[in-house]
Image (tube, rainbow, N blue to C red):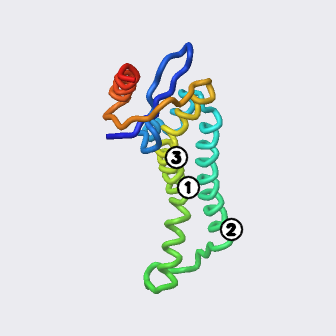
Amino acid sequence: MKNFKIVQHPTLGTKAVREGGWSWWGFFFFGWYFLFKGRVKDFFISWVLSAFIMGIGLGLKVYIENFYWDYSFSLEIITDENLTYMALEYLNEYSLIIFIWLSQIGMWIHGGLLGNKSRYAKLISQGFECVDDFEANNSPHAIALYEKSKQSS
């Protein structure tokens, strides 16, 4: 059972929004989910987060190439120093790809964590009013519980 907030608008009707929790729609469609739901600010936050993480990867790549690169080591004799250089070479070669993946994972998590909260905030900004909350299996079930409680009182 999940906790749903029932929001009501005089002309737009009644809707049930899941309170907090994980949003699978937000996870799979990450930043685009916010744009589809009209949350432009959250969309840009998601993309800025992604660009920031990719910028760290690019900065690390440039830093390794310019300050830590030494082509004088030999791979024939493996020492601790050579292992360090081999690790730096691997990191230099794949750092941008690694940070691109990390940025995508960051966007997925951002969308999953904030998807439901963002939808609720959007409805409140449109003039909906929170009238009740219910534990239900899904939003139609929560609306049915609300209608039933409204009829009984």
| Residue 145 placement (x, y as % from top left) | 35, 27
Q: Which type of secondary structure does the marked residue at label 3 adopt?
A: helix
Circle on res. 110: 3
Q: Nearer the viewer, residue 109 or 72?
A: 109
Residue drawn at the location 53% of the way across and 31% of the way down = 130
Q: Amino acid at mark 2?
A: Asn
Q: Nearer the viewer, residue 30 or 131?
A: 131
**Vertical comparison of 87 with 27: above or below:** below
* Circle 1 crowding by C-alpha within 10 Å: few under 14, some 14–19, many from 20: many
Q: Quadrant of residue 46?
A: top right
Between label 2 and label 3, give the one nearer the viewer.
Answer: 3
Is mark 3 in CB contact (under 8 Å) with mark 1?
no
Is mark 2 in CB contact (under 8 Å) with mark 3?
no
Residue 92 falls left or right of residue 76 = right
Q: Amino acid at mark 1?
A: Leu
Q: Which type of secondary structure does the marked residue at label 2 adopt?
A: helix
The residue carrying mark 1 is 96
3D distance between C-alphas at marks 1 and 2: 15 Å
* Circle 2 crowding by C-alpha within 10 Å: few under 14, some 14–19, many from 20: few
Q: Which type of secondary structure does the marked residue at label 1 adopt?
A: helix
3D distance between C-alphas at marks 3 and 1: 21 Å
